[in-house]
Amino acid sequence: MAKLKSLKNRKSPLSESKRQVSFLARSIPGVDSFVQKLATSQLKHLTPDKLEILQINLGYMCNMTCEHCHVDAGPDRKEIMTKSVLHACLLAIDKSTVNTVDLTGGAPEMNPYFIWFVEELSKRNIRTIVRSNLTILVSNKKYKKFPQFLKDNKVVVIASLPCYTEDNTDKQRGKGTFNKSLQALKVLNGLGYGKEDSGLELNLVFNPGGPGLPPNQSALELDYKRELKKEFDIEFNSLFTITNLPVSRFLDYLLVLGKYEDYMKKLHDNFNPETLKNIMCINTLSVDWEGNLYDCDFNQMLQLKISNSIGNISDFDNDILLNRKIVLGNHCFGCTAGAGSSCQGSLN
């Protein structure tokens, strides 16, 4: 099987993205392309609906290097969104139908303008989500003040916790991650996050540890709530199960295992047309650290920009964007397999 270059031998992120796009486009015996598969469904094609969510990647810098990370984030990444780009995001929000801003990274908290930007969103009564790896909140004195800040601004916290056991979590995200995550969750619980009627929303994210589809989201949520409460007295609101897409670091992982073609066939064979009604690229727009626009966060990692003239948030035009054609690829099978997958969890 042909393989991509290892992480250590990679060139620029752009050249690596082009290499991955080319690789993902290769045919696999018994596997149709996503566009071919889509054509067999009742929907036949994907078109944008009303824009509700602006997902903004504040930068690829992170205090962690998780093996499943589709962003290829880590401490060595220097890409950080500037204040001028963040200001352009605010101008776009002000003239759009966006009601939710989803802040991601890397570790979004590491952006030097994070506090300023969240305060600006709060002034606009925009529902604000921060996707946190949890460990950043207890990593040093600078970030230990952030949980209180998030509470003060009623920010929704979505946190990665791939398992309720130490061994499985540390295997996927690094030694010591589980205990640091518990520490952060206890801090958030102490502020009211995840508590009934507090108005402070805390959701957890499960990613499979290997090349498999997530289990039933509702059933797994019950397991998480039972075990975390019983063992650690930790509470949260909802669990989101998210399929690992064959992009970036997880693609490398599949290739090392020799499981890439098997995984793509599994995604293909579990294609569920019902998921297309709620797929996230219909109501969501992704913004990278330079302000470039994409149909989703995964397209951003592959440098597959949106298909019309509005290429950057600084040129935002709601009507033109609403009439664009959504850019698709074989990685899209990850969002439509089984119960489906989006940044808000399963789709049906």
Image (cartoon, grey):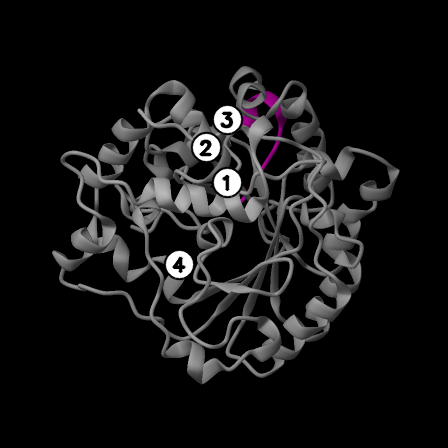
C-alpha gap between disc 2 and disc 1: 6 Å
**Residue 60 image position (x, y, % from top left):** 64, 46
Find out whether the residues at labels 2 and 1 contact each other: C-beta distance under 8 Å.
yes
- Residue segment shown in magenta: 228-238
C-alpha gap between disc 4 and disc 1: 17 Å
C-alpha gap between disc 3 and disc 2: 18 Å
* Residue wearing tag 4: 280
C-alpha gap between disc 2 and disc 4: 20 Å
Q: What residue type is labelled 3?
A: Cys
C-alpha gap between disc 3 and disc 4: 24 Å
Describe the element under mark 2 as helix, strand or loop: helix
From the image, state whether disc 4 or disc 1 is nearer to you. 1
Residue 122 visible (yes or no): no
**What residue lies at 50% left-to-right and 78% top-to-bottom?**
97
* Residue wearing tag 2: 250
Find out whether the residues at labels 4 and 1 contact each other: C-beta distance under 8 Å.
no
Q: Which amino acid does label 4 sit on?
A: Met
C-alpha gap between disc 3 and disc 1: 18 Å
Q: What residue type is labelled 1?
A: His
**Residue 209 image position (x, y, % from top left):** 44, 25
* Residue wearing tag 3: 163
Q: Which amino acid does label 2 sit on?
A: Phe
From the image, state whether disc 3 or disc 1 is nearer to you. 1
Residue 105 covered by magenta stretch = no
**Of 234 and 112, which appears nearest the observer?**
112
Residue 180's image quarter? top right
**What residue lies at 24% left-to-right and 50% top-to-bottom?**
34
State the residue lying farthest toward the top. 167
